[in-house]
């Protein structure tokens, strides 16, 4: 079946512009996660959704970052007034989040490489 | 606080050698889950294994094996008879075990290079 998809695969923008990154989770997965991977670094958690609600948004680095999820499916991560330090690969993951049994395995998309000039 | 440490930044071995990637974690939770992911040069993270804190049995999957030791808070990963295709960055990760959805805390990764 289809995996997690993200668009665009690459985005180059100028400092100060807003960008929107999109994630399509695996069909039927109720949980959706956003992570960020800076060059040569590990993965940094940003936010996750259970359905359309975001129980944990503790990783968003500033109020310039926001995310939403509609219809329990597609999610959009928006970065306003982009800065050069926002340059990174933004990864989306989804999991079934079945009741009980602890956290399910998260399956990752290919990422969006964001470059802020 | 939760933390995952992968002290080996880079490892390089010759093909067919065995190699072990170390992972040490910190958590105050009694219920937690551990993961390993592989990130090949293509960039996409590939899930390898998920293990809960109550299951300390070692696991083997083909050339891959994992050694989970709660006494030392370690979850090490061994590749036997390594191959060039094993070259990738490997991440060890930790999640709290109290709900079906939880953020994952990743280690900084170990870059493994297998030389022909």
Image: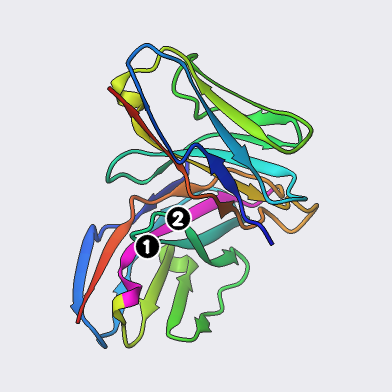
Instruction: In the rendered structure, find residue A28 and report the number of the disc placed on it.
Output: none
- Tell me if residue B18 can be seen: yes
Which residue matches tag 2?
Answer: B44
Query: What's the mark number on residue B40?
Result: 1
Percent across and percent down for residue B20 are 31, 75
Q: Nearer the viewer, residue A55 or B47?
A: B47
Magenta extent: B85-98
**Residue count near mark 1 (Cα–Cα under 10 Å), binned few <14, some 14–19, many ≥20:** some
* A39 in the magenta segment: no
Quadrant into which the C terminus of chain A falls: top left
Q: What x and y, as percent, mark residue A88?
A: 36, 35
| Residue that appears at 49% across and 62% down | B46
Q: CA distance from mark 2 to mark 1?
A: 7 Å
The residue at 43%/59% (across/down) is B92
Asked if the residues shown at circle 2 and circle 1 are in contact, with their CB atoms under 8 angstroms apart, the answer is: yes
| Badge 2: chain ID | B
Taking the image as shown, residue A54 lies to the left or right of residue B73, namely right
Can residue A57 be seen by looking at this rendering? no
Are marks 2 and 1 in one subunit?
Answer: yes
Instruction: Say if B71 sits above or below B95 in the image.
Output: below
The quadrant of the rendering that contains the N terminus of chain A is bottom right
The residue shown at (79%, 32%) is: A71
């Amino acid at each position: 079946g289809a995996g997690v998809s993200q668009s665009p695969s690459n985005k180059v923008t100028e400092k100060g512009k807003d960008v929107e990154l999109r994630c399509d989770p695996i069909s039927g997965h109720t949980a959706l996660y956003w992570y960020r991977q800076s060059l040569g670094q590990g993965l940094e958690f940003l936010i996750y959704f259970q359905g359309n609600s975001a129980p944990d948004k503790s990783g968003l680095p500033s109020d310039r970052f926001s995310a939403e999820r509609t219809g329990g499916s597609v999610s959009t991560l928006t970065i306003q007034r982009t800065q050069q330090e926002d340059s990174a690969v933004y990864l989306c993951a989804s999991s079934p989040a079945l009741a009980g049994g602890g956290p399910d395995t998260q399956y990752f998309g290919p990422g969006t490489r964001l470059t802020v000039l | 606080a939760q933390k995952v440490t992968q002290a080996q930044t880079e490892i390089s071995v010759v093909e067919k050698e065995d190699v072990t990637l170390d992972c040490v974690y910190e958590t105050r939770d009694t219920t937690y889950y551990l993961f390993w992911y592989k990130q090949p040069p293509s960039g996409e993270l590939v899930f390898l294994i998920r293990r809960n804190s109550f299951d300390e049995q070692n696991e083997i999957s083909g050339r891959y094996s994992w050694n989970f030791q709660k006494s030392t808070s370690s979850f090490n990963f061994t590749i036997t008879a390594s191959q060039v295709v094993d070259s990738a960055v490997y991440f060890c990760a930790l999640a709290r075990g109290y709900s079906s959805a939880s953020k994952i805390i990743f280690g900084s990764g170990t870059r493994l290079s297998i030389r022909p």
